[in-house]
Amino acid sequence: MFGLEVEGAIFVVVFSLLAYAIVKFRQRKGDDDLEPPQIYGSNQMELAWTVLPVLIVVVLFLSTAQVIHRVQDAKRPADAIQVTVVGHQFWWEYRYEQYGFVAANELHVPVSDPQHPTPTYLALLSADVDHSFWVPRLAGKTDLIPNHPNSMWIDPQETGLFLGQCAQYCGTQHAKMLIRVYVQSRPDFDRWVHEQQQPAVADPSVAAGRALFQAKLCFVCHTIRGTLAMGKVGPDLTHLMSRDTIGSGSVPNTPGNLRQWIRNPGTFKPGSLMPPQDLTDQQLDQIAAYLETLR
Amino acid sequence: MASESMPLALHRNPLSVVYEWLATVDHKKIGIMYIVYALLFLVVMGIEAILMRIQLAHANSTFLSPQVFNRLFTLHGTTGIFFVAMPILFGFGNYLVPLMIGARDMAFPRLNAFSFWMTAFGGFLLYGSVFAGGAISQGGSAPDVGWFAYAPLTSPAFSPGHSTDFWTLSLLVAGVGSIGAAVNFVATILSMRCKGMTLGRMPLFSWMNLVMGGLVLVTISPLTAAQIMLMVDRYIGGHFFDTDAGGSVVMWMHFFWIFGHPEVYVLIIPCFGFVSEIIPVFSRKAMFGYPAMVAATVSIGFVSLGVWAHHMFTVGMPSYGNAFFVLTTMVVAVPTGIKIFNWLATMWGGKIRFATPMLFCVAFLFQFLIGGLTGIMLATAPFDWQLGNSYFVVAHFHYIIVGGILFTIFAAFYYWFPKMTGRMLDETLGKWHFWLFVIGFHLTFDFMHIPGLLGMPRRVYTYEAGRGWETWNMISSIGAAVQAVAILIFVYNMIRSYFKGAPAGNDPWDAWTLEWATTSPPPHYNFAMVPAVQSRRPLWDIKHPEDPDWRYE
């Protein structure tokens, strides 16, 4: 789009005229006290500087409308990946319906080949208030609005980690509702999908922690597939250890951080909707050990 | 009467002075009360800004909690629009319009006083929330929903307690005051011009207040309606914005922005009026293209009613919906740009005197040009999909509100303070104020565009390190400190000059409109004899009887 060049030209022209005027037409010492010639207007000039902007607007509008159409009304390729994004206060739920699993906070998508595009289409829903999905290096933002499903697509042509965050004020911890998009090669993406599709690892050595997860009511908010935990309020923890971060991207996923998060999420993210947990040190160790097996 | 022009009428009982101001229906006193009220809240919102800028100077700062920060930006925006910008412009309009049109007061003096007190009460109500206590959430009850208070964040589920209600009710009350003021402006300007002053001969400032008044009458109603619906939802079982029950969150956005966009034109149009009075006088030339300026202003008034959904480009409207609002938003840029050309043409061939009012107007031209261009960028919906709701938008609208509106308000202060008080503001202090504020403004808001371009959203109490945002945020914060110093110099200038400034006389600037034909300050009745005019610049005609304007208009 050449809109920036047009605006740049407008700025240069008008600014130069202004700079010239304030230098050339300043009152100088020793000037006579006579008033300068009073010019009340000029029909030709005023017509010209009306018509020219109108033409600029027409051109800019037409080129903008074309881009809008190309983005919003793009034809969806058959090989597109489909993910449903559900915005929560203050985390992201990613439902991979076509693959049969739910993830949270870290979105994995396959890289797209321009010759044979495999963009990812995101259906955008909200579980509570307005949010907005914004990963600047991948696409413009689109809002997640309760009862107003939206759709957007990304077509990343380079692998890597792309950072973003919620872009519509959604409450106390809007600032830490971070987004991490992992664009992977097709084989890596398929491998990740396969891992996510498995039920939770059932390691017998952390049975104490698994039992506590039920007893201490963690299951009310969280899902761990393959167990009785089917809560939908908080993020799915089935493959918690496959993520680099916790707290929706705001805290590195280390054993120490995980333990402290469980004890009191407010130390990292005050205003997070997960309450502090009433646990003894030993119980905390056991639950943390359990969660650390959920690769 | 001697006591009219003496700054401190020491021989009068202080209590009777207080009563006189509390009970006055005189447009000049009411104008001054609006202005002083707004200046107090300008300081308050400046402190809120400084606190936020301290918090944002570093990544992951813990200077402020998220709860406090979120209340600060809500109060900052709400205060700035409703309790600083609108009152200060109503104040200048109230003071100047009757004088400029040769009238003795506004059409409805008691409505005038009522409107001021309603607005004033609204501001106290909003800040009363800070002290009210008793909310279910953590201490303090100031609203924290942002100045546009999107549903459903404002629903009882997500905003328990009464903080949101303070937002709603304070603005509802202030809105009543705004409507009263607008009614008064429209009635006064249409029916109380002096003999010979056709609509085509009244000062441009008066035209601007007429258009502003009409716009206020149209635009406040949707906001009031939305707020009533919100209260119904919150308290008596309504579901206007409750999506679980078939309500619509997007509807709040439409109602709010149908108010919100024309509102910013309500703010800028009187400022165009300041500039249209000051630039001609300091260029020593008549305003270039008066009829086009009027036509442009009226068109801006109308077209601005049709652009509101450019605040909603990311909400998921269909492509043709987005395209429509791109078109209307770009169209409104045309008459706005034309005015810049007219002001430039007024300066062209003149003999420009760079007293402080003119300095602020020249800076306005430069900054309004830039703010307008970033506005056109944002009007381009695909750009807005990236830059909307980011610090690029924050930089854009502060460029217009501070770089445009506030700069012209400063110009108006330096220009009309002599008329209101009988004393000149100090020019040296004025230049210090100007240059420091220019430096501070550009430090803060030029560099603020960059974090927006790099992905920093707005309304965040902190941000991660390593995104490349820290340096720019630090520079913005330093600029805020520089602006604060400039404001202190300005306040000092006003206080000092009120007592010790050089006497101004009737017409210190050698100007041409009727307010300069009476004493400084004017007597209670404005003019001993109601003037009659024959042109747009009645004092020019008197000063140049060999070359009067009415021969050329």
Image: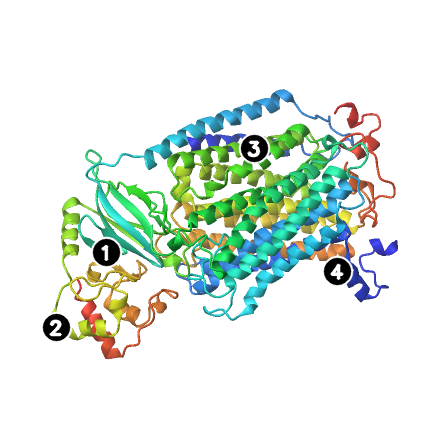
Asked if both marks, 1 and 2, belong to the same chain, the answer given is: yes
- Residue B175, horizontal then vertical, whole percent: 61, 52
Q: Please tell me in which quadrant of the rendered image residue B498 appears.
A: bottom right
Q: Which amino acid does label 3 sit on?
A: Gly
Q: Which amino acid does label 4 sit on?
A: Leu
- Residue B323, horizontal then vertical, whole percent: 42, 34
Residue denoted by label 2: A205
Asked if both marks, 1 and 4, belong to the same chain, the answer given is: no
Q: Which mark is residue B22?
A: 4
Q: What residue type is labelled 1?
A: Ala
How far apart marks 1 and 2 lie (CA) works out to: 25 Å
Residue in the picture at 61% in, 32% down: B296
Of the image marks 1 and 2, the number of the one nearer the N terminus: 1
Judged left or right of residue A187, residue B161 is: right
Residue denoted by label 3: B337
Q: What element carries label 3?
A: helix
